[in-house]
Amino acid sequence: MRLASYANRGRPFEELLNYIHAGYQSSGIACIHKVPTEFIPLRDHKGRVCNVKVEHKSCVDYLGRYRGIPVAIEAKHTEGNRIPFAQVQDHQADYMDDFCKDQRAVGIVVVSFSLRRFFAVPWPFWRIARKQWASGKGKSKKVINAYGWQWTTPGMASVSAEQLLPEWEVKAGAYLELIDRMGSNLAAGGE
C-alpha cells in the first residue's frame, strides 16, 4: 500500500475546488484557475527524473474573477480539528496583502476540515490573527471588523471550525455568496 506524501495531503481538496471552479467557468459564473507551481526536475546518474524541487514558490493557490471582482484564494486542508494560521506561509501572506491593496480585490482562505466542513475566511481576518500570533501577542484576543462582520481572534496559533463565524461556513468550498457580500461591501466603500 502506498501512502500519500505529506506534500499531497490537501490534494483531494484541491481536486474538489478544481471541479467546482470548472463548473463555475462552464456555466459562465466565474473564471478561477489553479496557479501552477514551477518545478525543476532532478535527475539520477542515468538522466532519469527521480525527483523534483520547487523552482519558485507559488503566490496563492487560485486566481480569477467573479462578477468583475478580482479574487485570490489560498486553499488549506487539515485532518484535525484545528488549522494553524501559519499554514498560510509568509510568501503567500505577502502576496495576499499586495493583491488586496486593490480596493476592488477580494482575498479569502478556503479551509477544509477533513473534507467534511468548509469555511471561506476573508483575508483581513486571517491576516490579523496570523500576525497577532506571529508577533507574540496571540494569546490576547482581538476584535476585527470587516465587510460587515465582527470576529474575535481565538488568541491561539490555530483556529477550530467552531471558532470561525457561522456565516463563513460554505458547502463543499462553494463560496461565491461570501464574495458577493465582500464585493458589495467594497463597492459601498467599506472593508
Image (cartoon, rainbow, N blue to C red):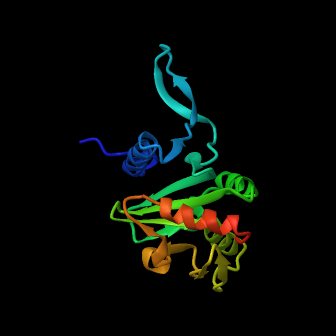
Q: In this view, does 74 lie above or below 2?
A: below
In the rendered image, residue 108, in percent from the top left (x then y), is placed at: 58, 60
- Picture residue at 50% right of the left edge, 14% below the top: 47
In the rendered image of this protein, does residue 76 appear above or below residue 135? above
State which quarter of the image contains the N terminus: top left
Residue drawn at the location 71% of the way across and 72% of the way down: 190
Q: Position of residue 98 (x, y in %)?
A: 74, 54
Instruction: Locate residue 137: give its quadrant.
Output: bottom right
Image vertical order of residue 2 relative to residue 79, above or below? above
Residue at 63% across, 72% down: 147
Number of numbered tags placed on the structure image: 0
Tell me if residue 60 comes above or below residue 130 in the rendering.
Answer: above
Q: Could one spot residue 72 in this view of the protein? A: yes
Q: Can residue 5 be spotted in the picture? A: no
Measuring from the top left, give residue 107's x and y in whole percent: 62, 58
Quadrant including the C terminus: bottom right
Q: Where is residue 146 in the image (x, y as percent from the top left)?
A: 66, 74
Q: Which residue lies furthest to the left in this view?
A: 1
Of 67 and 191, nearer the camera is 67
Q: Quadrant of residue 169?
A: bottom left
Given residues 4 and 126, the one toward you in this image is: 126
Residue at the (47%, 43%) spot, across then down:
28
